[in-house]
Image: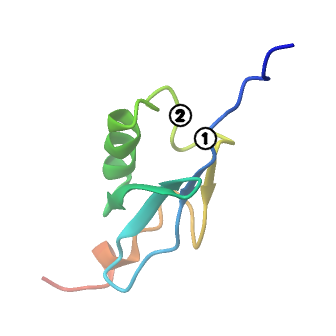
Amino acid sequence: MGNPTQYPHIVVHAPALDGSRRVTEGEVTLGLASHLDDVVEILRLADLDRIEVEESDLIEWQGGGPDDWPGLSEHEL
C-alpha cells in the first residue's frame, strides 16, 4: 500500500519588530519575507509555487493575514 499524498504545512509567522515574517515548512525555515511578494518568491524557490498564497488552506498565517505587514506602514522613512 502506498503512502498517502502529503501536503506541505507552510507557516507565515507573526511579524517581527521590523515587520518581517519568517516562512517555514515544518521545522525548516524557507526564508524571511518583508512583503507578500517575498512569500510568493520564497515558495517558488522551494518548488511550492503551485500554492495560491492568499487563499490556500496549506498556509497558516500567524499574527495577521497576507495583508498584514506592520513594519512597512508603521515606520517612517
Q: Which of 56 and 32 is in front in this view?
A: 32
At 79% across and 23% down in the image, what residue appears? 4
CB of mark 1 within 8 Å of CB of mark 2? Answer: yes
Q: Which amino acid does label 1 sit on?
A: Glu
Task: Judge the density around disc 1: few (<14), some (14-19), many (≥20) Cα neighbours within 10 Å.
Answer: few
Q: Nearer the viewer, residue 5 or 35?
A: 5
At 35% across and 76% down in the image, what residue appears? 19
Location of residue 75 with respect to 70 vertically, above or below: below
Quarter of the image where one finds residue 2: top right
At 25% across and 85% down in the image, what residue appears? 75
- Mark 2 — residue? 52
Q: How far apart are marks 1 and 2 (CA)?
A: 6 Å
At 31% across and 81% down in the image, what residue appears? 18
Q: What residue type is labelled 2?
A: Glu
Q: In this view, does 25 lie to the left or right of 6?
A: left
- Mark 1 — residue? 55
Quarter of the image where one finds residue 8: top right
Task: Judge the density around disc 2: few (<14), some (14-19), many (≥20) Cα neighbours within 10 Å.
Answer: few
Location of residue 5 with respect to 63 vertically, above or below: above
